[in-house]
Image (cartoon, helix red, strand yellow):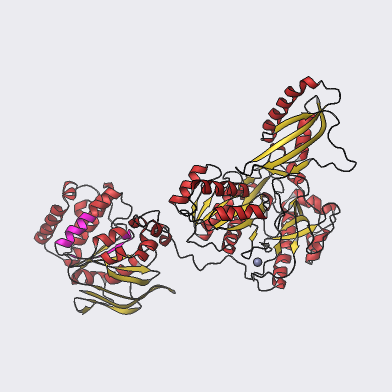
Amino acid sequence: MLKIQNLQVHYGAAQALFGIDLNVSQGETVALVGANGAGKSTLLKAVMGLVRPSRGSIFFEGTDVTGFSAVRMVRQGLALSPEGRQLFGELTVFENLQLGALALKLNKSKVKQGMEEIFSRFPRLAERKDQQAATLSGGEQQMVAMGRALMARPRLLLLDEPSLGLAPLITDEIFAIIRQLSRSGVTILLVEQNAARALSASTSAYLLVNGRILQSGNSEKLLADPKLRQAFLGAGSDNRPEASRLGAAGLTNIRLEKPDMTNQSFMPSFKSEDELHTHQLKGLQWTINHVYQGSSFYRTQLEKAGIQPSDIQSLDDLRKLPFTSADDLRDGYPFPLRSVPYEQITRIHASSGTTGKRKILAYTQKDVDDWADFFARSYEMAGITPLDRIQIAVGYGVWTAGMGFQLGCERIGALAVPTGPGNIDLQCQFMLDFQSTVFCSTASMALLMAEEIHKRGIADKINIKKIIYGSERSSVSMRQKISELFGGAELFDIPGLTELYGPGTGIECPNHDCIHYWADYYILEILDPDTLKPMEPGEWGEMVVTTLCKEAAPLIRYRTRDITRIIPGPCTCGSIMPRHSRIRGRSDDMMKFRGVNIYPSGIDSILSEIPGLGSEYQVHLSRDAASGRDSMKLVVEQGEHCDRKRSFELATETVHQMKKKLLVTPDVELVQYGSLPRSERKSQRVFDTRLQDDIV
Ligand code: ZN
C-alpha cells in the first residue's frame, strides 16, 4: 500500500533522514519506534506531504506521490493525527472534527454521516461535542485528534505519538482504540516512543536511530530479540535481569531519548605545549586586567607590588605577582576576591570546615559553565560516556562537591543518580535497581560501600565499573581493597578545591600513574612552602594556582596548602595535558576527619579557652579496619596546678566544646602535666595512622 524508497530529508544543511526504505501492506499496523530526534516524525511528515524529501520516492497504492501537497495526500486517502494533537482549543469538539473533512469538500450529509461514525467509535466525544477542545483531558484531546484524521476516511492512518504525555491508564484506552481501528480494516503507520507498547500493538516494526533504519521485521520477533530488549526495552525483559541493565528505568530507553552526545569531546584542541602557553599568557593577561579593573582588593595588592596590567608580557612575569591566601578569603567574607558587580554573581559555594575557616566563593554563570565543561572533561578522561549511570554519593548543597559531579554529569549527558552521601541502604538498593555504572564518593565512603557490598554478597549483582573518589588521601592498599570488593572496579582520584571552582580540576590518568590537570583553566606552580621559591620539576612542594578565565572570584597565586609535585615529561596515555601527583598532604597540618577540615590552630583555641587544661596535646587519627570508620583521640595535658580530681569534668567539657565548635566528637584522655614530649622545634601533634602505606 505504501512503499518508501531511499528517502532522504534535509532541514537546511542538516540531514534528518538517510535513505529510508519502508513498506506498509494493506490492513497492517506498522510501528516506527525510536528515540526523540531519531527522525520518526520527519518520516511521517514527509509521507504526509508536510516536509519535502530531498531524495527518494514515496508510492501510495501504486501512484508516485513524492512531493504531493498535504491536501492532495488527504484526497489520495491518507490522514495524519499529529504529535501533540494540534487542536484548535477555542473551537468545539464538533468544529475540530469537521476540519478533518475539509480537504475532501464533502456535502453536509456525508459530513454528518462521518461525524456519527466518529461518535459511535468515541462515545466520550459525543457527550462533549459542544465543549471547547482546550477544556478536554489529554486522553480526550487525543481522541479528537484521531477522530479528526478519521473524518477524512483515510485508507492509511498516520498516528504520531498517540500516547505522548498521557497517563498509563489513558494510554491503555488509546491503544485499545488503535487495535479496534486496525480490526475494522484501517491500515496504520504508528510512530511511538513507547517501544514496548508500539511493538505489542503492531504486526511489523522499524527501529529508527539517528535518521536510519537500524532494524525491522515482525513485531513479535523484535519484541523477543534479546539485543533489542537490552538496548531498548528495559522493563520488557523482567525475566532476564542481565538484559535489563541498560534499560531498567522503564519501558522506553532513557538513553535514546536524549540528543546524540556520543561524539562530543571536552578535551582542549591544543596540539603542542607552545599553543598551551600562548593560551595561558592570554588568560593571565586577561585575569590581571580584569581584577585590576574589577576588584579593589586585587588592585590594592597589585599597586602595593608596583604592578600594572601591562607589565605582564610573558608567563615568567607570573613570579612578580603577589600571593593570595585563605586569610584573604576570610577577610573578604562574604564576597572575597569579588571582581564583578553583584548582579553578575549567580551563586555562591562554601568549603567544608568550621565557621572560622569557612571559605565562600562567588560564581558567575560563565564560571559555572566553565566548571561543568571541565568536569565533563574529567568524566571523559575516565572513559565515561552518555550511556553511563553515575551514582553521586557526595554532599549536595552549599558544598561544591555534589554540584560539580552533577553539573559534569549533565554536561556529558549521562544519567545522574544523585543519592548524596551516607544512607548505605539506599546506596545499595539504587546500585542494584538502577545498575549504576559509576560511583562517586570520598575514599572512605567508597571503602565503607565496598565492605557493605561484600557483606551483603551483592558484588556480582551490581554493575559499578568505575569509582571516582576525591577530597581525601587514600593509600595503595585501600584502593586495592575498594576495587576488589566492588568486583574489580577501576578507581579514579579526582582533585579539586572550592577556591578553584570545586572538584574536577583534573583527574587521574586512564593509565593510573598521575593526575592530569586542566592547565587551560589555571596555572599550577609548585613552591617551597617556607621560602616560596619554585621547586624543581618532580620535587614535592605547595600547590599555588592562578586562574585564567575565572570571573567572579579569580585566584592570583593562591596558596592552596596542598602538597604535590609536577611530573615532568609526556604521559604514556598520550594526553598533552600536564600532570601532577596525587595530593600527599597539607603544608599547614590541616586534617580531614569525616569530611570536616580541622586545623591544629582550631584545637589550640578551644583548649586555651577551657581553664584547667595545659597547652600540650596530641591528636591521634585512626581507622577501624573492619568498619572503615575513622576515629579521633585527643590526648590533653592538665594544667600544672590543676586538681587531678577534675579530669573527668575537664574531659567532658573538652568533648562538648569540640563538638560545638569543630563538629567532631573525639575520645578525650587527660594526662598529667609534663607527660607529653616537648621538642625545641615544632612538636608533632598530629598522628594520623589511617593510612599505613605510601601515597602514590
Ligand atoms: Zn596520562
Report if residue 306 is visible in the image.
Answer: yes
Report if residue 502 is visible in the image.
Answer: no
Q: Nearer the viewer, residue 512 or 98?
A: 512
Q: Residue at x 75, y 67 (%)?
A: 568
**Residue 87 horizontal/vertical position (percent):** 27, 55
**Residue 672 horizontal/vertical position (percent):** 82, 28
Rendering quarter of residue 636: top right
Along the horizontal axis of the image, is 265 left or right of 471?
left
Q: Residue at x 74, y 30 (%)?
A: 669
Rendering quarter of residue 22: bottom left
**Residue 308 horizontal/vertical position (percent):** 81, 59
Q: Residue at x 82, y 60 (%)?
A: 535
- State which quarter of the image contains the N terminus: bottom left
The answer to whether residue 214 is magenta is no
Q: Residue at x 10, y 58 (%)?
A: 113
**Residue 527 horizontal/vertical position (percent):** 81, 57
Along the horizontal axis of the image, is 646 left or right of 351?
right
Q: Quadrant of ligand 1?
A: bottom right
Rendering quarter of residue 633: top right
- State which quarter of the image contains the C terminus: bottom right
Along the horizontal axis of the image, is 122 left or right of 262?
left
Q: Which residues are magenta?
A: 175-195
The answer to whether residue 189 is magenta is yes
In the orientation shown, which residue stands out farthest toward the right? 680
